[in-house]
Amino acid sequence: MKKIFRWFSLRSLHSKTSLAVTLTAAVLIEVTSAVQYFFAKEGIRQEVEHRAQSELRAKSLEIRNVMTAVEVAVENMSWAVEQRLAQPDSLLLVTQKLLADNQYIVGSAVAFEPYYYKEKGRQFSPYTYKHDGTTTSLQLGTDQYDYHSMEWYTAPIQSGQAHWSEPYFDEGGGEMMMSTYSLPIHDATGRCVGVFTADVSLDWLSETINARHIYPSSYNVLVSRSGQIMACPVESLVMHRSISEVTANMEDTVIQHINRQLAAGKSGQAVVHDDKGQKKYLFYALMDENTGWAMAVVCPDREIFRGLRQVTFNLSILMLFGVALLSLIIWRAARSAQRLQAVNEEKGRIENELHIARAIQMSMLPKTFPPCPDCDEITMYARLTPAKAVGGDLYDFYIREGKLFFCIGDVSGKGIPASMVMAVTRALFRTISAHESRPERIVSAINNTISEDNETNMFVTLFVGVIDLQTGHLFYCNAGHDAPVLISRDGRRIGMLPVDCNLPAGVMNGWTFSEQDTFIDSGTTIFLYTDGLTEAENAEHGQFGEERMTAQLSRLHFHGEDVDRRSAIRACIDQMTDAVHAFVGDAEQSDDLTMMAIQYCPKHEDEERRRLSITLPNDIATVPKLQHFIDEVGREASLDASLTMSLNLAVEEAVVNVMEYAYPQGTIGTVSVVATMETDMLSFVISDSGSPFDPTSKAEVDTTLSVEERPIGGLGIHLVRQIMDSVCYERKDDKNILTLRKKIDNI
């Protein structure tokens, strides 16, 4: 020691300083290495935690997707079971279809309460299952297989709610390890009469859980709500041991805490030691609240930090590891940037496609207001404002045979699906109303077409109306839509049009829709809208409501002699739109907004119409009286002799047809003819109370054929069609009503 001390004492200050610097550098290197080691280890631990949590989320999502698919499949098929309760032997078809439509379901049963079907005995449960690629159907309930005591049956019956059972081996049934989803079924009175089930094999769970791992020696464990091991690398433990039994001999008390956490459905992480003293990182989480299943990811410490320990004493390798880690970070950042760019490009493409879809959808709506510029009886305007790029509202209108056909509707949902249903509904309205004048029949045909194979369960509220422009007679049918508003000529009387409570179109095939009618007074405005108007919400979730709507309508000035009707009707829609926007403010539009206003003002409405009428018994011998009547109409209307003769032929042919076909031989009845003379139109309304008889149902006669080739009949209505401008038939109040119209210039 003395020699060493003397050696140090003889050193120059420079040597001592160099030594101090060397020692300091060595200490700094060691400290730097230790700090680098600490942060590297911490970074790896966090990476493991992140990957483990990602693994838990990914596995949970995979399992939840399958479970949800099973639940949705069972719930979507439950209505078929409840509809077939009166046909127990047909329930097996439901279970077979459920298996055929879902690859994850290996078995399905409809299990009933004891003696629900007395002729079937105490236990009745049609069951279908798949095993080794073969589908087998059988009667599940037997003396050896009393399903009434099994959890998959008792739990939903007692709780009245859907239930996932604990995993079990279905001996006597599917003969495999499975878990069963059970849904209570009810009869027409609402009484729970049994359950509808779907079985999921545990083999699928094992394959999913062990498909991939964070590290080669890491593994995943899936446990049930009771702690049963459902999936793990050791197949002998599956459904034979609980997690508590497996860890009972471990001295590490943290294990018991984790078991309690798993049983309580909680998530977390911990460092544990197995029975051999090896350190492991354990991450656990609840996979699904409905099933109570939990999953744990186990990662051995020696494998996680094996690389780091190899470079603990080698600073250069540690630096290379840092460079590699940095390169990995840069690479991941570059990939993230590429993904972000791809997402932005995809977003731009979708927005462009939605813009095109919006343009297509809006182009389908009529834009000519009024529908016929030469039609002065109607002034109207409409507007549709979608809540998204495309919407589910619709409106349409056109004039045919002196009648205005119009509709307004609101499809359930929003976005592209709703826009597709909207397009279909509008096309159906145009197609059906082209040859059908009764709103009830138009709505019924639309309903039956939409509801057929309606797997998405989408529907449309719809109002269809037909206005006779000569008489102001409005026929309409409402399918679950908001009632239109009627505004009187002077704007002082505002009220809702009475509508029946029919179902929306697309809900039930074959539903019988009711038709209503009323007369629209001259100058009356019909205001139609969708619930996007009354249910428009502001930032405080307050709704615009019917009161604000009617108050706004009462303030509008679109009546009076000095008002430009077309501009006023458009202003009605514009001002109502402004009122809604002012109420909503900065709040996002929550629903599509559609409005349509129709004002009925027949030409020369202040002039008194001239009418003549005659009533004849159903006796052809009285036809000469009809001829004198037509001659009188011709004189009143100042018609020339040739036109009067043509009208005589047409009306006489129509009346004789009624006498011959509407009243069977020996039947006593009358035929009424009402002639109405207006400025440029002469109309004859022929009505009778006889049997239903539609002369317009006869097909057009092909006059190019020879007499021998031409079918018998149809020449009479052909003559009427040739003379008159329009011929329209309807059955109303048990009466045949045939309307003949002729345009003339000299009335």
Image: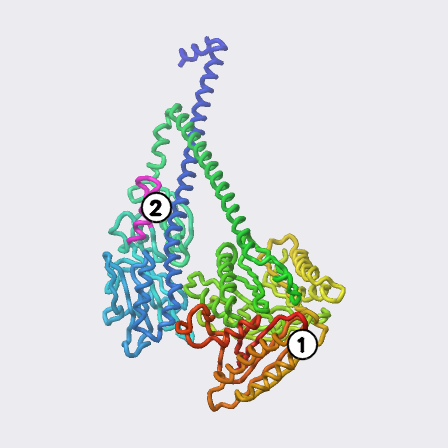
Q: Is residue 205 left or right of residue 374?
A: left
Which residue was labeled with disc 2? 252
State the extent of the magenta-drawn residues as a range: 203-221
690 or 16, nearer to the observer: 690
Rendered location of residue 563, percent (x, y): 74, 63
Identify the image quadrant of the C terminus. Answer: bottom right
Q: How many marks?
A: 2
Image quadrant of residue 403? bottom right
Residue drawn at x 41%, y 34% as measured from the top left:
41
- Image quadrant holding the N terminus, namely top left
Residue 107 placement (x, y as % from top left): 29, 62
How was this image coloured?
rainbow
Numbered tag placed on residue 637 in the rendering = 1
Amino acid type, mark 2: Asp
**x, y percentage for residue 480?**
54, 69
Image position of 671 with respect to 128: above or below: below
Task: Name which residue lies at 35% across and 41% down.
Answer: 214
Is residue 418 visible in the rendered structure shown here? yes
The residue closer to the viewer here, 14 or 599, is 599
Mark 2 vs mark 1: in front: 1
First of labels 2, 1 by sequence position: 2
Q: Quadrant of residue 643?
A: bottom right
Q: Is residue 260 visible?
A: no
User: Residue at 35% of width from left, 72% of height from top?
Assistant: 84
Q: Amino acid at mark 1?
A: Ala
Q: Is residue 341 left or right of residue 295?
A: right
210 magenta-colored: yes
Q: Residue furthest right?
A: 562
